[in-house]
Image (spheres, rainbow, N blue to C red):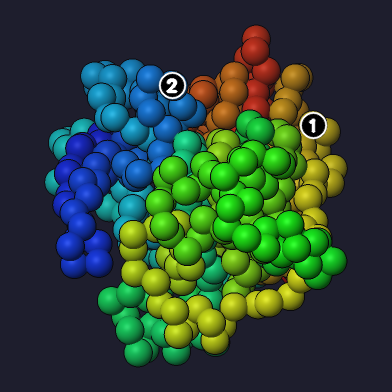
Amino acid sequence: MSRIKRIRGAVQDYVSQIDGNMALNWALTTFVVRYYGIWKEVETEKKAWGKMSSENPLVKRIYDSQCAASSLPPSDLEKYAEIWLGTHPNAPSLLIDSDSPTEGSTSNSTSLNDYITSSPTSTLGTHSSTSNIPYLLKILSINKVLSIQSHPDSTLAAQLHASNPDVYKTPCHKPEMAIALTDFKAMIGFRPLSLLWSNLQSYSEVESLVEIKSPTDEIILKFNEMFPGDCGVLSPIFLNVIDCTPGQSIFVSSNTPHAYISGEIVECMARSDNVIRCGLTPKFKDVEVLCGSLSYDCFEPVVSGGVESGTKGERVYRPPVEDFEVRVADFKEDTVVEEVDAGVILLCLEGGGVVKSGEEKVDIKFGEALFINAGTKLEVEVGEQGCKFVRALRNVGSD
């Protein structure tokens, strides 16, 4: 029986109330990406910070690639913000048995979560401590700064979920990593004390914001245009502002204030959506929880370019948490990718080729994705333009 399962996406519109008096239109658009042994549905979410369609952002290009592959019309959303790959309940991946007599009908769809939990050892590996994917992989196209936010650690997340499950929907922590695909600007953590003190002296009066004297001034004025009067406008005075080039990454630990400002990135995180918002947003700010949980450590951020893996042309980004690691491969020639004892999500970012395992083989091109069972050795036959892809998996370095 074929291991390839296929689905087709649909478009749905939602209206969400924010702070009880502000309505935003959310467009949740599902699209098709192919998995190793399955076809998978993911969702693109229209948010205020997404890139305009006219800019042809990465999220839109991936979406349109899959529409074309599935004989669907091109997308027509105004903005494109992010794509989720995984089993998160807000955007679950779906599978359909291609051998079914009603192939292509979503009535026979099953979730990737069900597929995994039916045989967690063969899909996730012998060392997996859960019966689900412990991570969520995203692609973000950022045009407007995201809210300044932090994420609770495991202990606090469990407490918040128990006391306020409508806001904090899971009892899990949410450390995350961002890897730049284009030039990427972000804020993370409080500046070292010497720099913070210097900034406070420079901005002793509000009038100093009127003139553009430094890059920090420019960011403050830009934030004020986006969110007039918001408390987060002055955040660049206190928080580190960093610039990453393609291939560089940052890791955001629990309780650390941060905000992504611009660029296109791969983001991987623990499978949670718990957010404690600080500013630059009209959404709910839980001030008491924020002040009580925030880490006020002052430090210089670490920007990492990853390290070489055992496979030529691949770099691994391994954070100090067990939930996930990310590997980015840029293959120019046919390559053997050794098996790992973990379930893997693979997304093609450039070029394409053929992915083989034994007698099974799958063509892959830009925008398509694979779910690869634990312990699967891959042979990658690259196409004329090479093959660049990202793989997300649990942190096997912690075994």
> For this view, does 47 lie left or right of residue 15?
right
| Numbered tag placed on residue 56 in the rendering | 2
Q: What residue type is labelled 2?
A: Asn
Residue located at (25% from left, 24% from top): 76
How far apart are labels 2 and 1 at the CA level?
28 Å
User: Residue 226 location, x and y as percent?
Assistant: 42, 45
Residue located at (67% from left, 63% from top): 204
Residue located at (24% from left, 42% from top): 27
Q: Which amino acid does label 1 sit on?
A: Gly
Element assignment for label 2 = loop
**Dot placed on the residue nearer the N-terminal end, 2 or 1:** 2
* Front in this rendered view, residue 260 or 209: 209
> For this view, does 59 lie left or right of residue 108?
right
Name the residue beneath numbered marker 1: 313
Q: Can residue 386 be seen in this view?
A: yes
Say if mark 2 contacts mark 1, CB within 8 Å: no
Residue 23: image quadrant is bottom left
| Numbered tag placed on residue 224 in the rendering | none
> For this view, does 102 lie left or right of residue 121?
left
Element assignment for label 1 = loop
Above or below: residue 159 compared with residue 29:
below
* Front in this rendered view, residue 332 or 195: 195
Residue 354: image quadrant is top right
Indicate the quadrant containing the C terminus: top left, top right, bottom left or bottom right.
bottom right
